[in-house]
Image (cartoon, rainbow, N blue to C red):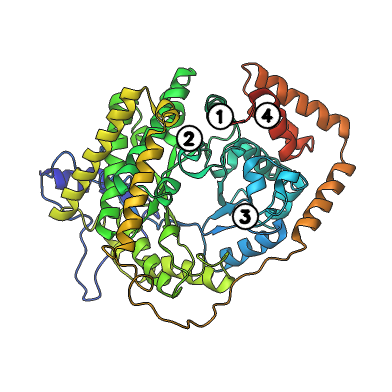
Amino acid sequence: MTALEKWARDVYGKAAAKPGALRKALFETSSRIPIAPLYSPDEPPASIGFPGQFPFTRGVQPTMFRGRFWTMRQYAGFGSAEQTNERFHYLLKSGQTGLSTAFDLPTQMGHDSDSPRARGEVGRVGVAIDSVDDMERLFHGIDLGKVSTSMTINATAATLLALYQAVGEAHGTPASALSGTIQNDVLKEYMARGTYIYPPGQSMRLITDTFEYCSQAVPKWNPISISGYHIREAGSTAAQEIAFTLGDGIAYVDAAVKRGLDVDSFAGRLSFFFNVHNNFMEEVAKFRAARRLWARTMKERFKARDPRSWTLRFHAQTAGSTLTAQQPDNNVVRVSLQALAAVLGGCQSLHTNSRDEALSLPTEASARIALRTQQIVAHESGVCDFIDPLGGSWALESLTDELEAKAVDYLRKIDEMGGMVEAISRQFPQREIEDAAYAAQKAVEEKQQIVVGVNEFAVSGEPPFETLRLDPELESRQVERLKAFRRKRDESAATRALSDVKRAAEGTENVVPRIVAAVKARSTLGEIANAMREVFGEHGR
């Protein structure tokens, strides 16, 4: 029996035999040509292997999209909790299968909406969340026991998780039944995005506290989404995105292990978040290289024993930096190609950007087109009937090897510096990203890289494009709502809970249970962040 036949019987066959494991009984082309589970040489190279088996180059599940499609998780969040809740319901009704939440800058930076530092930013680039009442309104009418929710939040991630838990429990869903992800990846904020609060050491402490808390209290929750997306948006190359993302992941795992956590107690819940850029073949190869490199890292470097700890599960989002304000309908084509690359690369969930996001927050019509793009790829393209359809392509396998080698070289340099935290303090990844971004921009300006509708095929007198406009009175209403929230609460209970948060931060106690207690005592997000600011300080201040 060949290796392929053995995989087809023992791995794919067992997975496919489970009731409801496959989307349909027969997979064939429009010409009635049967589609085999996998196309591969009988004895593929060990570096490629088979889907669902180490080193997972070809996918983390044996059946991949023959079993079920990726989670279609459109990113949404703007204005008030009610406005975003309305968009959530619209997207779920349109066929979205998971929620993904964008928060405004004050929420990301740990400032309540009435803070002077929040002025002019409330509800602008995401939804404003100050309190448990805001979180209640955000998810009104949505059963948190039946939906998976991703939250793009970092410095205040533990607080948003606590708010979500409080709302779920208030409606009868225990913490143990909640599923979703908090981004919680602060290291990439120092190198690529900037929404950090505390110094790196204290941020790492909060992250490992969250790992420990989730492993015990919220076992279905992914406590971190290690994010290369923003690294790529800042201008990195594909190889740098792999290296710096996995470098951050290594730092988080190392910190948790040093904390005394068994690697297999949390590694299976780690998730990743990657960009999907324009170079189609390179992007597919990037995902395969990242999966393989992470599997080897977890098995060989951290000695993880559970195969789930070796798997790199990732969410993908099409590249916002590739969208153009000129000829915005062209963005539909860009996003379609990027979405297809993510699917062929084996993503577990996907967000497709809307055509108007270079101009404003997306309208409902644009968000629907973006979601329909995913649905067309899933239901009409036929690519999901194949497992790793590009696997074995000489070009793709060569690109996969090259990207992995470049990433390994970067990781070696990072290790020589003493790890990712030290590398960031030396500005190493920041300089590498800046150099790559400069080279990419220069290529566009010199027309070595064509951007359709921008530096070639441009048109004059483009018709106006309808964009979403936010209510200018939004901020004042949110501030008044926050003041009313504080007036109605038991002030002494909130104060005691905040003192407990501060005391936990001063010692070695896990601070997350204290944060959960604080939100249930109706402390606000900004108050909780400030309690820890008093102990940890602020980075750069």
Other residues around mark 3 within 10 Å, as few (<14) / some (14–19) / many (≥20): many
Q: Is residue 252 above or below residue 125?
A: above
The residue sitting at 40% across, 55% down in the picture is 20
Residue at the spot of label 2: 187
Q: Which quadrant holds the C terminus?
A: top right
Residue at mark 2 to residue at mark 4: CA–CA distance: 18 Å
Residue 109 position in % (x across, y down): 63, 41
Say which amino acid is labelled 3: Gly
The answer to which image quadrant residue 421 occupies is top left
Other residues around mark 2 within 10 Å, as few (<14) / some (14–19) / many (≥20): many
Q: Are marks 2 and 3 in contact (CB under 8 Å)?
A: no
Other residues around mark 1 within 10 Å, as few (<14) / some (14–19) / many (≥20): many
Residue at mark 1 to residue at mark 3: CA–CA distance: 23 Å
- Where disc 4 sits, the SS reads helix
- Where disc 3 sits, the SS reads loop
Residue at the spot of label 4: 533
Q: Which quadrant holds the N terminus?
A: top left
- Where disc 1 sits, the SS reads helix
- Where disc 2 sits, the SS reads helix
Is 42 or 122 nearer to us in this picture? 122
Task: Answer with left or right where residue 445 lies relative to residue 368.
Answer: left
Residue at the spot of label 1: 203
Residue at the spot of label 3: 126
Say which amino acid is labelled 4: Arg
Task: Answer with left or right where residue 510 lies relative to residue 302.
Answer: right
Residue at mark 1 to residue at mark 2: CA–CA distance: 8 Å
Residue at mark 4 to residue at mark 3: CA–CA distance: 23 Å
